[in-house]
Image (cartoon, rainbow, N blue to C red):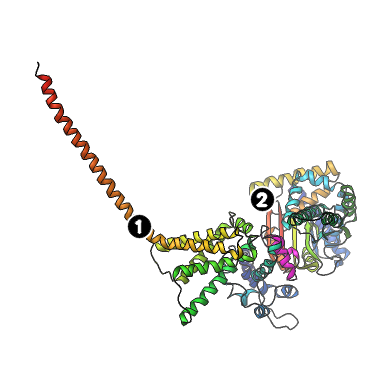
Amino acid sequence: MAAAGLGPARLFLGRRRGAMRALLGLARGLASGPQTHFGFQNVSEEERREKIYQVFENVAEKYDVMNDSMTLGIHRVWKDILVHKMNPSPGTLLVDVAGGTGDIAFRFINYVHSIRERQLQQKLKRHQNLSWQEISKSYEEEKVKPLGDSQVVVCDINKEMLKVGKQRAQHLGYSEGLSWVLGNAEELPFDDDKFDVYTIAFGIRNVTRIDLALQEAYRVLKPGGRFLCLEFSHVSNPLLSRLYDLYSFQVIPVLGEIIAGDWKSYQYLVESIRRFPPQEELKEMIEDAGFFKVDYQNLSSGIVAIHSGFKL
Amino acid sequence: MAAAAAGSLRRAGWRLWRGRAGLRCQLYPPQRALHASAVLRRASDEQKKEPLASSPQQQFDSPPTDPQPDHEPQGSRPSYTGQGGQESEDYESEEQLQHRILTAALEFVPEHGWTAEAIAEGAKTLGLSVAAAGMFHSDGSELILHFVSQCNTKLSDLLEQEQKLVQLGETEKKPTDQFLRDAVEARLRMLIPYIEKWPQAVSILLLPHNIPSSLNLLTSMIDDIWHYAGDQSTDFNWYTRRAVLTGIYNTTELVMMQDSSPDFEETWRFLENRIADAMNMGNTAKQVQSTGEALAQGLMGAAVTVSNAETNKAVRAELCSVPCLMLACLPS
């Protein structure tokens, strides 16, 4: 995964800075945790968590705008495909981890709402000779339970992202079946066997200990529950890979500077994508956490992949 | 070295998940012990409840089908002893769990149709989350294929039992047309509880990605029926017999779907007529051949007669023309 253009120079500087920091870290004491990566730098785990928190604190306001401009709006399609793959039925409990600004949660609510409407319509169609009372009762039922007991809990470690998410929900008019919880993916504040579906869209890359997050996912899911992960992944096509690298390292940080005023955060973003394990490796990690029928689907020829597993 | 080899084996054989599971267990026993399966029951429990968990006739599974589902449950999940001193037990496989879910889903089909909703309801009755329906294709095709395969297995068992009774001498051997009629009727009667949603099922089975599996199930069922009917032909008859019975079965199924008579009497009468037609087809073929030959001879004779008549006319015309010519020549 060679970075193009400025990449090597940055890499070199990054390594130097990282080495210095590592020495300082050693000096500070080994209690700050084992070494891990932050983009192309090497940092301790504590530091990584802090830095990522800061990254998202900085980008929270402009997160959605940047998503649209970086992916040219295709991220909406990816998220739609994720929710279609989930195919939730009314009554499903979803926990969307690292779901800060609520994209997946809103899509989930829309989907369940339309399924519920279709169910009620079919019920009406089947009973041909209904009295007016029965018809009005079914409409009332629709108003009282538009989602049919489905609920989504949006969990994020970052307060700023949750704040932006709540504002968006208010703005778009989502109130039913939605709750916002502050929590760490490596240590979720929920009981065991609680949720039907666990999703983490473009979030697992930022988790420091992925195996812990996967174990937590396993814990909070009900038996039969589904784990879904949407994340940037490895492009195997060499030509596309070169174009993608070029775009990532040359265009995205520039966009970050212009739109959000933050070059470094977006530099971190593209570097973290390169450091993330590819499809097969992530699949094995998910299997190690105890999930069955683990499979992945490449979107946009590998730029993004959806991994799915079941707790059986 | 072992880890590298195991790693590459894992990557190569990711679809044969049983092999994978075995290797993984050998390398990471502590992790697996932590995550004992939440749902997959022990094979011993399951065998107490269901004598037949999976049938050897289920050929419709996608390529990673386990070739011997019945022989493998013992080795399906690796046994491990690290769980607080518990004895190592064998667990059922994912496929067996899927079959259980689909069987449970069948009772919700009259209400929800052959859809992912029925599968979700089925999963709920087993104590699983509704998200387990995500294991299957969202158009419900696996449910239908499972049902068809189950019906075929039941039919085979029925025919085998009948054959045993005949061999023991307790019943008479039925004539072929009676046998075929009873077999097809028995098979179609299994559709009666789901007959309202059956048109939906047929349309889903005709989707391009389902055609190989559904055709496979259909042909194996027809083959079974002929086998138990005592067909031992080795010539082209083998094909004609099966083609004819397939035609009869499909048309009777279609008639059944729109039949509203009590207990589907019309359907069984239709079936009787079609089988009688099929039986007569042999005689009819011979008759057609002989008629054809007779007709051909008749035509030949007519042609000869006509050509003779033509020749005669021509000769007579010639003969007539000569004296005329002569008469014409005289005055000169």
* Same-chain status of marks 2 and 1: no
- Chain under disc 1: B
Mark 2 lies on residue = A301
Which SS class for mark 1?
helix
Q: Is residue B75 left or right of residue A55?
A: left
Q: Is residue B117 magenta?
A: yes
Residue A308, percent from left and from top = 71, 61
Using the image as rendered, state which of residue A75 and residue B195 is in the foreground. B195
Residue B132, percent from left and from top = 72, 65
Residue A8, percent from left and from top = 73, 49
Residue A90, percent from left and from top = 79, 59
Mark 1 lies on residue = B287
Q: Is residue A301 left or right of residue A216?
A: left
Q: In the figure, B303 relative to B13: above or below?
A: above
Q: Is residue B275 left or right of residue A228?
A: left
The image quadrant where one finds the C terminus of chain A is bottom right
Using the image as rendered, state which of residue B210 and residue A47 is in the foreground. B210
**In the figure, residue A84 lies in which quadrant?**
bottom right
Tally the numbered discs: 2
Using the image as rendered, state which of residue B243 and residue B177 is in the foreground. B177
Q: CA distance from mark 2 to mark 1?
A: 64 Å
| Residue span colored magenta | B112-140
Identity, as a three-letter code, of the amino acid under mark 1? Gln
**Residue B217 seen anywhere in this rendered image of the structure:** no
**In the figure, residue B120 lies in which quadrant?**
bottom right
Q: Is residue A21 left or right of residue B220?
A: right
Which SS class for mark 2?
helix
**Residue B94 seen anywhere in this rendered image of the structure:** yes
- Chain under disc 2: A
| Mark 1, other Cα within 10 Å: few <14 / some 14–19 / many ≥20 | few
